Image (cartoon, rainbow, N blue to C red):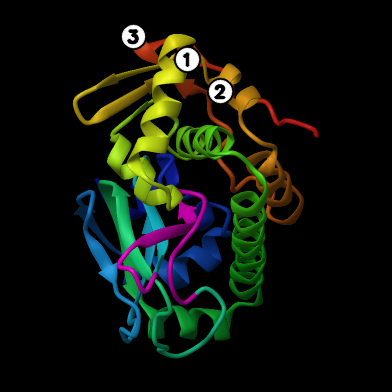
Amino acid sequence: MALAQRLADAPVNNLLRVLRPSDLALIEPHLSLGEVKAGDVLYEPGDDVKRVFFPCDATLLAFRVMLADGRAVETALVGREGALAGIVSQGRLPAYSRAEVQFGGPLLSMDIEALDQAKLKSAAIRNVFARYADCLMAQVFQSVACNAAHSIEQRTAKWLVSAMERTGDASLPVTQDHLAGMLGVGRSYVSRVIQTLKQRNLVETRRGRLTVNDPTAMAELSCACQSAVRRHFDEVLRGVYPEEPIRGANGVMHPAVAMRED
């Protein structure tokens, strides 16, 4: 299938799909479509970032800040609602954080210089990327507040809800070690939380995979941070944050997770 047709017909990358055809035409010739695997590193701190990355479908990327003790703590998730690198600034700049693949799948990418040229030609493209940068910054701000104020159980539930919304799937290729690393806590803390969720029949785990049995109940257990981020997306860049139903076990479809109001 031609890339242009794929962009038009499939839920590939929502940030690109909100562009008008005339604006997308400035970008589409420069896009390359590839596959990435969980654990792939797109760039490290200090790297000269040369390409922009657009996660597609259920591909999930993360910004991870490297700490002095060797840990890499997640600061933001990016799915098909967004992009990594070259969002606002023009020209190649050194990376501050690691960009890592959390869930593998299709990934569109293009040279930053080509995107810079498209921004110069189109105010609409500049506007979309500036608005997305605002949404991404809101997510980082909310993450800082969440880490300081909420319990590990709430943060675990928030991460699971965030991943489900971005991938459209309640069965996630994630382990307890993975979750602990994302949250920046010890594995034993996450293990206790997962055991509690199992006892309440909210999750099931199998080798390398965690399934949320009731996405709505998981959202209720979560703090309101993810809902706040989603509301901001809807206000600043409506139509970009995923709103599709979440596929549960045995193909059962759950409504998009309701937003909490605290």
Residue 82 on the magenta span: yes
- Label the magenta part by its dominant secondary structure: loop
Q: Is residue 169 visible?
A: no
Q: Nearer the viewer, mark 3 or mark 1?
A: 1
* Residue 116 coordinates in the image, percent (x, y): 48, 84
| Badge 1 density bin: few <14, some 14–19, many ≥20, Cα 10 Å | some
Task: Name the element at disc 1.
Answer: loop
* Residue 70 coordinates in the image, percent (x, y): 30, 67
Task: Name the element at disc 3.
Answer: helix
* Residue 88 coordinates in the image, percent (x, y): 57, 78
Q: Which residue was labeled with disc 2?
A: 218
Q: Quadrant of the N terminus?
A: top left
Instruction: Give the magenta range.
Output: 67-86
Q: Which residue was labeled with disc 3?
A: 250
On screen, residue 114 versus residue 138, left or right, reads left
Q: Quadrant of the C terminus?
A: top right
N-terminal label among 3 and 1: 1
- Looking at the picture, does residue 254 appear above or below residue 154? above
Marks 2 and 3, how far apart in space?
18 Å
N-terminal label among 2 and 1: 1
**In the foreground, 80 or 219:** 219
Asked if disc 2 and disc 1 are in contact, CB closer than 8 Å, the reply is yes
* Residue 83 coordinates in the image, percent (x, y): 46, 62
Identify which amino acid the numbered label 1 is placed on: Leu
Marks 3 and 1, how far apart in space?
16 Å
* Residue at the extreme right of the image, as rendered: 262
Identify which amino acid the numbered label 3 is placed on: Asn
